[in-house]
Image (cartoon, coloured by chain):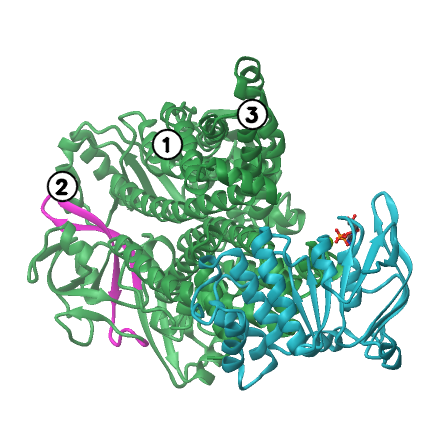
Amino acid sequence: MSLLTRLAARQLLTQLRTTEWRALLLASWIAIALTTLLAVLGDRLERGLMRESASLLGADLVLSSSRPLTPERLQGLPLQGIQQTPVIQFPSMVGQGDNLMLVSVRALQAPYPLRGELVTEPAGTGIPAPGEVWVEPRVMTQLQLQPGAQLEFGYQPLTVSRELLASPDRGTGFRSFSPHILVNAADLDASGVLAPGSRANYRILFAGSSAAVRTLDQALRPTLASHERIHALQADQPLTGNALGNALSYLKLSALIALLLSALTIMLALRRFSLGQHTRSALLLNLGLRPGQLVRVYLYQLLLAWLLTASAGILTGFLLESAVYQWLAELLPQALPPAHWLRWLSGAALGLALLVLLGLPPILQLARIPVAHLLRGDAPPRDRTALLLQGASMILLAATLLAFLEAPLAALGLLAFLLLGGALFGWLAQGCLLLCARPLARHLLLGRLLLMRLRQQRQWHRLQAAVVVMLLTLLSVVWVSRTDLIEQWQAQFPSDTPNYFLINIQPWQKAELDTFFAERALDTELYPMIRGRLTQLNGNPIQPQLNAEQQDHNTLRRELNLSWRAERPAHNPLVAGDWWQPGDTDAISIEQDMARELGLELGDRLGFDIGGIAVEGVIRNIREVVWTSFQPNFYIIFNPEALQNAPSTWITSFHLPAEQRALSRDLLQQFPSLTLIDIDQVLTQLAGWLQRLGDSSALILALSLGCGLLLLGVTLLQALEQRRFESALLQTLGVSAEQARRLDLLEFLLIGLVCGGLASASAEGVLAMLHQWLLQIPPRLHGELWLLLPPLAAMVFVLIGWLIRRPLRLDQCYRLLRAG
Amino acid sequence: MSHLNREKPLIEAQDVAKSFNTQAGSVELFRNLDVRIMPGESLAIIGRSGAGKSTLLSLLAGLDTPTEGQILFDDQPLEQLDDAARADLRLQQISFIFQSFHLLPELDALDNVRLPLEIQGRKDADAQARHWLQQVGLGARLDHYPAQLSGGEQQRVAIARAFATEPKVLFADEPTGNLDDDTGQQIIEQLFDLNTNAGTTLILITHDIDLASRCQRRLHLQNGRLEEVPA
Ligand SMILES: Nc1ncnc2c1ncn2[C@@H]1O[C@H](COP(=O)(O)OP(=O)(O)O)[C@@H](O)[C@H]1O
Ligand SMILES: [Mg+2]
């Protein structure tokens, strides 16, 4: 081993005993572990569920439509050398007896899939034979099925012949997360579950040589109707609007906090470290070491530290990832593929960037220290180059972090928010501290000293308060909202809120269904539902008349559900205009948010494309719609005279008390083509996701809290000499060691209480905003926060302060004073 | 002293001035200083605290540059040397002994002495280091770390380290300042013994008159002037 590496190793070994190096190692360990966790988990989720890869699509190219795809649709397309197969996917209630669940059904024809494979238990090839059904494990458990059991599927009982462990072509959006069953398309007609006009996704999968697929893709795109989509491989893009993708970026953003805190910890630790290295560097330079060699000694030391933390970090990242994956496993539709091996190294790479970028500026400074420092104690020169270097490394670091987070704008926004919020909390905390200390100063001997201390430590107090308040706020909000929000949200609904939607009702079933409900004394109302696109405003195409944000509005990008009625729906009060009279054929009613966001007013003439037929209407009134009322709700309602001849299906919702659940079975037996959606089940599934998301971000925030505590320790360390000197001075001036200790205790207690109080207040504020705007329910106070946070924060300060600051004996005081 | 005039001086300060820019304006420590230091000579610089002794020392050793005038080392103007060349000069020809010892705490006595030799790339580093530690009477404590040695012993390690590289000049800035009188006395004895044997030029800063009187020449730095003090 060369002299330089030996020196570096020895240095590191000695430094390991110092608090700043321990903080540095812990901080980079957490940063590396967290980054590894997110990079690996994110990659697995993306590869498994979010990217349009061949094994995920089950094909090279998919044409997807909300209307049936007939063979005529493909006429004139270049299909030489192309294999194709149709798939129909739709939601349906299936079950055994009273035990029903909502699943996503895929009706298949061989060959299927064209790419990737179906993994089943028992293993085998092909697709379900007619009369058979393959179901996913979640269906097996929830319906308590055994292999060979019968599953009621409309009029057609099917035999569960295999368990489906993994499959491509799960479809997009929410349906890809529902439990799936696979049936043979031949069983579809006999079962009667899919009537004409029912909601379903119709797909044709294509596969072939890449040239043939490209030709087909190019020929297909210009012919796409508005209700059709193409999913292809070449754009390896994450699916847009994917809730899972949003959740993932949310988790990555919350990791930004931990990464920033570790970076700050490492920076302060290195600052303190390098301050202690001035004499040593000057000595080494004086003994003949060249500046370059000196830089290398310190870089080796950093690299050694990196090796240490990277191996620990990757291992921890592995353990965390396995744990989080276990959590998610029961919610995930199928097992995820392993991550690309490079992802395992991304945490270590980020750690290296952190250490080197933060370490290089102070190290280069050390190499420039004048040897005369040994005679006089000069600090290294702080000139433009030093500042430039520091600035450059900060920018590089920020760029690295942003690149890792893959959402630069959101991350920048969060960064700005954290800085602003932090500054605000810092100042607020300082104000509160002074407010509390003034009365104390009048009554306590220590009070006056405390005021002095507060003035002297004000910068550190600001930083500490900013970090602690922000972290406690975030942590409390996530912790509380994790369970509280959904419960509160659900609790606000009256007990007779509908808990079932019934869709795909054919016009000719309406009378029969009314009788069914009347016999059972269920109060329901059926609404017709017609799909159409909004295309015109006042006689001209609507798009050019809108601004960019409006053009991208949800109601313009897809087909709307339209309805017609003679009377105003009881649950939709009018906010403008009046309801129409018979004969006002072209009057329409619009939902208020849509009207406001698109800038539509009473009297505007809107044109719709309903299955190729143009229909016009004049806005007669504006309705308020509470979408969460679980009543059938529509953006646009027409006068019956305008639309009642258009092809429609009907929809209704109703409340079924728990003891009447059996009724749903009767309903489906009598009307197998209806789709019954159990809102409770859907909400439970959603709540499960939100809870896991909350748990995951709480885990990340807990790690951030760890970083925050380290940072707190390091900031207390920065002022340690000053504190020690002051304490020594006080003791020689006749203050007892006990009193000096109490002064520290008082300071920590006070700042802790202030931080805890501020955190409670700001957490209440954020929660109140969430209640008010997200859930639209009145906010409530969280007394437990006010009781818990202040003592918790005070304890944290006292504990860390106690760990870092050991009391000073009198003889040590003299020595300190003489040296100072 | 006539023979000295025949030889060339090892270090020569010509009309040197030094001032600092502080917040309160420019402060001049001294000006028009001239010093000639002959090879093998021992020289004491005395003066009260704050007189500028350490500053003068750092000028003579090429650690700092004068505001005016120039310093010649072996006839070579130091200002003409770049940083690397000056570092090389220090490595090969100059050693220091400091008031606060400045040993590396994580290296034992032997490694502390061996360090500059290894930096020089000398093959006999180990033997040399052992030899010099023997010379200062610490042959039995090679594997002791600085924290396990008394102040006097630490300073002796520093002396061994200074002589081990066989420098032409040895600068000592108040080497006994942190030691009690008796120990200081012993250290001084050792320093002068080794110096005589090795024929090193010794430049010593002290405010101890006894100590100064053991040097061949004494210069008193006072009010920015340097005056020769007769024996
Ligand atoms: N880099 C500097 N900048 C400003 N003042 C300095 C600097 N170095 C030394 N001084 C001042 O020069 C004076 C002499 O310092 P020094 O040479 O250390 O004195 P001595 O060693 O004789 O006690 C002191 O007042 C000191 O404050
Ligand atoms: Mg001095």
Element at label 3: helix
Q: Which dot marks residue A450? A: 3
The chain letter for the residue carrying disc 2 is: A
* Residue B224, horizontal then vertical, whole percent: 88, 53
Q: Which residues are magenta?
A: A88-115
Give the residue at mark 1.
A629
As drawn, the residue found furthest toward the top would be: A443
- Foreground pick, A619 / A281: A281
Element at label 2: helix
**Marks 3,1: beta carbons within 8 A:** no
User: Magenta stretch: residue A100 in it?
Assistant: yes
> Residue B135 occupies which quadrant of the picture?
bottom right
* Residue A115, horizontal then vertical, whole percent: 32, 76
Give the residue at mark 2.
A666
- Foreground pick, A53 / A204: A53
* Residue A29, horizontal then vertical, whole percent: 42, 58
Packing grade of label 3 (10 A; few <14, some 14-19, many >=20) is many
Q: Quadrant of the C terminus of chain A?
A: top right
